[in-house]
Image (tube, helix red, strand yellow):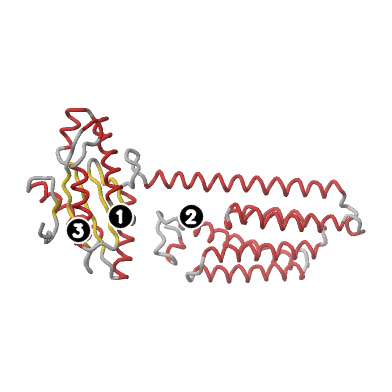
Amino acid sequence: MKYWRKHHPDIGVDDPRYHQVSLMYSVLIIMLLYFGLIALLNVTLFDDADIALYDFLGFVMVACVYSYVRYGGNFRVAGWAVIATLIFVLLAFIHLAEGRNYSLLWVTILPPFAFFLLGPRAGIWVTGLVFTYSAWFLYQLLDQQVSANLGLGAFLNFVEVGTAQIFLFRYYERSRIKAYDQLRQTSITDPLTGVYNRLHLDNTLKNLLTRANVSEQPLSVLLLDVDYFKRINDSHGHLVGDDVLVALTKVLQNGTRDLDLVGRWGGEEFLLICPDADAKVAYQVAKRLLEQVRSQPLAHGISITVSIGIATSTTNSTAESMLQVADQYMYEAKAAGRNRIGADQLPAE
């Protein structure tokens, strides 16, 4: 368990903010150590109190951002604050050193932080502006005595390295985001049907149920099982059975509301999570699906029926208890003859 989780218990591993927050804390700690160490070295080893002062200011600013994040601050705002602090200290160092001692090389540490914390688009603008200003500053020094050791070659090398870094980190960050999105999509998706898998449904149900309890809004789940599915596999083969499940998925997606979530619970079972749906609304959704499934042949002209169990949240509901209730009603529907709905206090037809 990462140490920062105690400050943000609501951010789980499956939360899109998880890696962003982890990176944010890592960057903040690195910068705290960096500014603290460099400030100490400038005071004790180099006897440069002016530069040490700016390093100390950077330390204080990053410490403030750390506290802001720790106590629930906006991570996007914190990212910009970190980059602004880093730019302030780097440019102050460059000006104080007047281009000496390769001070301009320090600006090359900006791109990885900017791209990682701000994203490709903002990262390229921020680093581009800072590199342009730094190149202009270096160019102004070429004709001054203080820059006797600087020449046109040094200026061109800085421009080349800066440009290469901008495009390299921009490409890397875009590739990383795309790869992460693909990986995340794969991790939450059932490979056969393309809908959500059981792990994502389980986590989502817990989160939605927590929100529903806070807002005092109803939440229902529908657990659906294909009747006599084994007969399809035995008679037509598993590949045909897979095609039937894929076709059934499309019927379920078309027959639910826009805010409902459809996922494959396992085998021939599907789970539907219906936010803001009381028992009556959930029954209407289930009835519509029941009729749509049995009214038309699916893949390879095969007709099927389904049995559905419904559970609606109460003040004491947990994700596990709701799934248990829905599973119980689904099996009661099967025991009563299949092709029907099981629920507490079914409405009169």
For the residues labelled 2 and 3, the Cα–Cα distance comes to 34 Å
Residue designated by label 1 = 257
Q: Position of residue 21 (x, y in %)?
A: 49, 60
Q: Nearer the viewer, residue 297 or 87?
A: 297
Q: Quadrant of residue 148?
A: bottom right
Residue designated by label 2 = 19
Amino acid found under the numbered disc labelled 2: His
Looking at the image, which residue is at 30% across and 66% down? 212
Looking at the image, which residue is at 32% across and 61% down? 208
Position of residue 113 in the picture relative to residue 156 (left or right):
left
Rendered view: 340 above or below 18? above
Q: Quadrant of residue 206?
A: bottom left
Say which element carries label 1: loop
Amino acid found under the numbered disc labelled 1: Arg
Dot 2 and dot 3 residues touching (CB under 8 Å): no
Say which element carries label 2: helix
Residue designated by label 3 = 311
Mark positioned earlier in the residue sequence (3 or 1): 1
Q: Nearer the viewer, residue 68 or 223?
A: 223
Residue furthest out toward the left: 336
Looking at the image, which residue is at 10% across and 59% down? 348
Rendered view: 191 above or below 341? above
Dot 3 and dot 1 residues touching (CB under 8 Å): no
Amino acid found under the numbered disc labelled 3: Ala
Mark positioned earlier in the residue sequence (2 or 3): 2
For the residues labelled 2 and 1, the Cα–Cα distance comes to 32 Å
Q: Position of residue 231 (x, y in %)?
A: 15, 33
